[in-house]
Image (tube, rainbow, N blue to C red):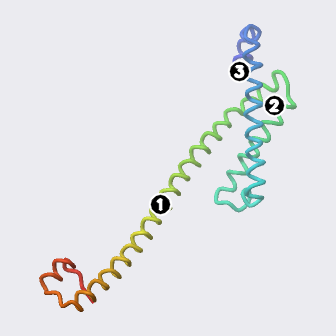
């Protein structure tokens, strides 16, 4: 939009409604990003912007969104279009979203792995307890060595 209107002003005059629609879309997107920053602040508090692992990136992101929004509100005409080059930095948002999804998936997989390992340990303990109980029953009933070997398949019975 910026480069087009600066380099080819006749296109801007012909397609004025497209530019007005894109300006409205830009306001909506900026307002959504501002709402996200506000909700992050309300939900996670100031620590989200100061103590989280990626706090510097959160601050940069908030600065970028707030600056873009304010400049779009207060500047008009060609000045606003030149400042509109900050849209390039909006791709930062896309990178941030992709990074967040990747971290979320990684965290999910790590949690899933930990849960499976804990469940495996619990099942091993339960199996050992059951083998011990069955071994005691086998000794009380005087099972033969062949039968015990068949049931316990080489496990050490206490």
Decide: marks 2, 1 in contact (CB < 8 A)? no
State the image coordinates of residue 97 (x, y, percent, origin top left): 61, 44
State the image coordinates of residue 27 (x, y, percent, origin top left): 77, 30
**Is 53 situated left or right of 2 in this image?**
left
**Is 152 situated left or right of 129 in this image?**
left
Tell me the number on the disc at residue 72.
2
Q: Residue at x 82, y 25 (%)?
A: 79
Decide: marks 3, 1 in contact (CB < 8 A)? no
Considering depth in this image, is 24 or 74 the residue closer to the camera? 24
Name the quarter where the C terminus is drawn: bottom left
In front of the other: label 3 or label 1?
1
Question: Mark 3 highlights which residue?
Answer: 1
Name the quarter where the N terminus is drawn: top right
Task: Name which of mark 3 and mark 1 comes first in the sequence.
Answer: 3
Question: Mark 1 highlights which residue?
Answer: 112
**Is 153 situated left or right of 20 in this image?**
left
State the image coordinates of residue 94 (x, y, percent, origin top left): 61, 39
Helix, strand or loop at label 3? It is loop
Residue 101, placed above or below residue 11: below
Tell me the number on the disc at residue 63.
none
Considering depth in this image, is 12 or 142 the residue closer to the camera? 142
Distance in Å between CA atoms under marks 2 and 1: 44 Å
Q: Residue at x 26, y 86 (%)?
A: 135
Helix, strand or loop at label 2? It is helix
Task: Name which of mark 3 and mark 2 comes first in the sequence.
Answer: 3
Distance in Å between CA atoms under marks 3 and 2: 14 Å
């Amino acid at each position: 939009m910026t480069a087009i209107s600066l380099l080819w002003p006749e296109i801007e005059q012909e397609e004025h409604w497209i530019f007005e629609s894109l300006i409205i879309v830009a306001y909506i997107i900026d307002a959504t990003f501002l709402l996200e920053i506000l909700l992050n602040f309300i939900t996670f508090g100031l620590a989200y912007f100061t103590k989280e692992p990626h706090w510097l990136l959160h601050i940069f992101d908030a600065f970028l969104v707030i600056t873009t929004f304010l400049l779009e509100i207060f500047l008009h005409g060609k000045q606003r279009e030149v400042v509109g080059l900050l849209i390039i930095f909006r791709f930062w948002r896309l990178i941030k979203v992709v990074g967040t999804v990747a971290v979320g998936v990684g965290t999910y997989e790590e949690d899933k792995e930990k849960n499976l390992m804990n469940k495996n340990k619990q099942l091993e303990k339960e199996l050992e307890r059951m083998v011990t109980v069955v071994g005691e029953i086998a000794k009380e009933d005087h099972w033969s060595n062949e039968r015990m070997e068949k049931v316990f398949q080489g496990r050490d019975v206490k």
